[in-house]
Amino acid sequence: MPRKEDNVPATLRAFAVVEALARAERPRSLTDLADDAGLPKPTVYRMLAMLEEAGLAMREPGMRRYAPGPRLSALARDVMHNGNFRAARHAVLDRLAAEIRETCNFTMLDGASVVYLDRVEAAWPLRINLTSGSHVPLHCTASGKLLLAMLPKAARERLVAQLELTAFTGNTISARKRLEQELARIRAQKYAVDNEEYHAGLVCVAVPVHDLRRRACAAIAMHAPMSRMPLDRALLQLPALRAAAEAMSATLG
């Protein structure tokens, strides 16, 4: 008797496994992925072997669990960067930068760093040359700490353990315990700051952008020189940042 899966092309069966990997908030076992994809375990096992070879899936070291591979993560970033709503997302940043008159960024996690998906520069002579596609560290940037804090506990702890806590300035958090305390504060307050932690004289405030499942998938941030906008004044921009984050979430549909 034909099985239901036999009527589904192999490409779509593989895509169901890819979707299950992309939706998972933590590494999933073979059984979990088979349940999530609605496919038999032997089929999913074969698909995972193929996806691993292609860099679309990866096995967690020392575990029989699977997570998105580097190629799948890169695909997600490319879709976010070049998708149909790119113009709408840029317009959100444009309006925010015009309102607060400082540089604004749209960022997301990329492995153990943050990648700039889009950026609108303030019309001031003093600025930092970070273009779309630039990467910055997690532990000393507002977006990095925010997105790290919002990860599920297991993923967050695993990533924190891997980080090199390089001290870029005297304010950089370079002790793991202190970083964990900072991340707990960020989870509670739902925003993060960079108080001259990456560049001396530069402050930054970041808020989360949520996807349809209310996961913090990206961040909107503003940064400014301390001489122009001290941190206490930068924090007054939180309502504008949060409104922009809600508008940005609507473009992720």
Image: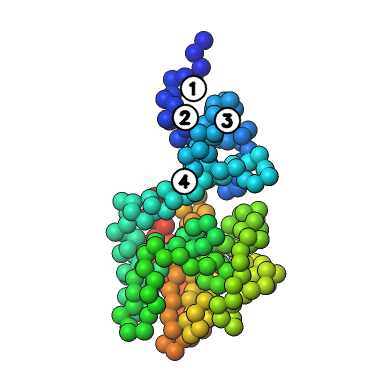
Q: Amino acid at mark 4?
A: Leu
Of the image marks 2 and 4, the number of the one nearer the N terminus: 2
Of the image marks 2 and 3, the number of the one nearer the N terminus: 2
Q: Residues within 10 Å of mark 2 (few under 14, many from 20)?
A: some
Q: Residue furthest bottom?
A: 227
Q: Residue at x 49, y 74 (%)?
A: 205
Q: Are marks 2 and 1 in contact (CB under 8 Å)?
A: yes
The residue at which mark 1 appears reads as: 5
- From the viewer's perspective, is residue 163 above or below residue 12? below
Q: Which mark is residue 13?
A: 2
Of the image marks 4 and 1, the number of the one nearer the N terminus: 1
Q: Amino acid at mark 1?
A: Glu
Could you tell me how far apart the alpha carbons at marks 4 and 3 are, in whole angstroms?
Answer: 18 Å
Q: Residues within 10 Å of mark 1 (few under 14, many from 20)?
A: some
- x then y, percent, for residue 11: 42, 30
The residue at which mark 3 appears reads as: 45
Question: Residue 43 versus residue 35: which sits nearer the camera?
Answer: 43
